[in-house]
Image (cartoon, rainbow, N blue to C red):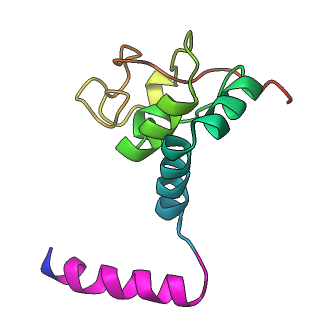
Amino acid sequence: ERLAAVVYPAYQRILRASQKLDFGDLIFGTVQLLRSNPLILARIQEDLSHVLVDEFQDTSPMQYELLRLLGTGGTHPDHDHDQSRGRGQGQGQGQGGTSSVANPIAAATVASY
């Protein structure tokens, strides 16, 4: 943890200096944008009928929050139970092979696809 406390701020400074973002920054920035701009969120929700999520059981809490924001209801996660790492041991947000998650998100395709 100490090493990360030193390395991560330096890593973030290098990214900012080179005007780059990593994957986590992209997700976090998108969540911040959608939370602070309800009109943008509403417009995106209007355009999406479904969101396809591969490997739902491996989503991080921030990815799950993005999916929760994008979800407009009536969506249900599903995944290949044979590929579940935890197989019921509570791995990831999707709980390792089950599709019973509070406020479930995910499924088929984007409306304009």
Q: Is residue 6 magenta?
A: yes
Residue found at the very far left of the displayed protein = 2
Q: Is residue 41 magenta?
A: no
Query: In front here: 73 or 60?
Result: 73
Q: Residue 83 placed where, x, y %?
A: 46, 32
5 with respect to 33 (left or right): left
3 with respect to 103 (left or right): left
Q: Residue at x 29, y 85 (%)?
A: 7
Q: Residue 2 placed where, x, y %?
A: 13, 80
Q: Residue at x 36, y 13 (%)?
A: 100
Q: Residue at x 50, y 39 (%)?
A: 66
Image quadrant occupied by the C terminus: top right
Quarter assignment of residue 73: top right
Q: How many marks?
A: 0
Query: Which residues, given as a range, are shown in magenta?
Result: 3-20
44 with respect to 72 (left or right): right
The answer to whether one can see residue 109 in this image is no
Q: Residue 87 placed where, x, y %?
A: 31, 26
The answer to whether one can see residue 45 in this image is yes
Query: In front here: 56 or 61?
Result: 61
Quarter assignment of residue 61: top left
Where 113 sits versus 49, above or below?
A: below
**Majority secondary structure in the magenta region:** helix
Query: In front here: 57 or 113?
Result: 113
